[in-house]
Image (tube, rainbow, N blue to C red):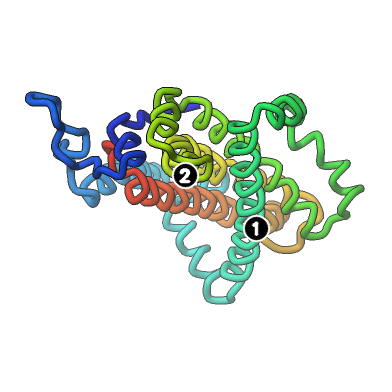
Amino acid sequence: MTKFNVTQDALTGAITGRSSDAPPSSKGAAPLTRRTRQAPVWRSEALRWLLPLALLLVWQVASSVGWLNVRVLPAPLAVVLAAWELLRNGQLEHHFLISLARAGTGVLIGSGLGLTLGLLNGTSRPAYLLLDSSFQMLRTIPSLALIPLVIVWFGIGESGKVFLIVLATFFPVYLNTLHGVRSIDARLTEMARVYGLGARETFRRVILPGALPSVLVGLRYALGISWLALVVSESFGASSGIGFLAMDAREFFRTDVIVLSIVIYALIGKVADALVRGLERRLLPWQVQA
């Protein structure tokens, strides 16, 4: 698990009510990380898109000159034309919205449960002793192994598909939240006690902001893995969704539509990751963003 470095000054400021941007009291103290000069966000985003665009260009050129068999791997232009064809007849929007609803529902439920139980087990030792061991056992079960049981439990309807996404997104958020709470410096909770903060205020001013960086890391990972779970869930008994679109295209050897489905998954994953990064910039202003 990745661990963000939450500055002690930021949390100390949260406890005492002093802004973390306030000048340090001791003469000659080091400036806060917030003062570090950062590159504009648009420039960073442009750099992130350089490599994918370069790969697309190479791919198109290789297809155009005959280095790639277009029946096995169609050119990017053919994929764009397939997307335009599906957009015109309304199929792409239909399948995309259904997949988005499935993934969104699963992520919302799974992440909510992971956050709640991660905070509970991180702050309560009895709850940790009672629940964590069982969660760790469940975490090691592959989702694919559960498909026969999920079909028996829920049939081939929507519930089974959402259940697999909930299961896949629960553990990343739970583990990172638990890790974030347990990584908080004990001196900060002691400082909160010295300042006379109650349990609720200690949770709001120390535990929650201290665990937030790890929670967001877990959410980023959960969003990514939710699409993997969606592909698995839409591979059995589905009659709609991006996964069904790809499986249906396989029957007719429409490799352009199959590649289009993969590209859609990649673009949605990229958008979801960008949203969480934006959330990090807003909620964690003391972090130095890459």
Residue 276's spot in the image, x, y percent? 43, 48
Q: Which amino acid, by three-letter code, is at mark 1?
A: Thr
Using residue 38 as the reference point, say whether residue 184 is left or right of it: right
Q: Residues within 10 Å of mark 2 (few under 14, many from 20)?
A: few
Q: Amino acid at mark 2?
A: Glu
In this view, which residue lies farthest toward the right? 152
Q: Residue 101: horizontal and vertical position, in percent?
A: 63, 62
Distance between the alpha carbons at the discs numbered 1 and 2: 31 Å
Residue at 14 percent of width and 31 percent of height: 25
Q: Which mark is residue 105?
A: 1
Question: Which residue sits at x=45%, y=29%?
Answer: 189
Q: Position of residue 47 (x, y in %)?
A: 26, 43
Instruction: Give the quadrant of residue 243.
Output: bottom right
Neighbours of disc 1 within 10 Å: few (<14), some (14-19), many (20+) = some
Which residue sits furthest bottom?
Answer: 89
The label on residue 201 is 2
Depth order, front residue of 62/220 = 220
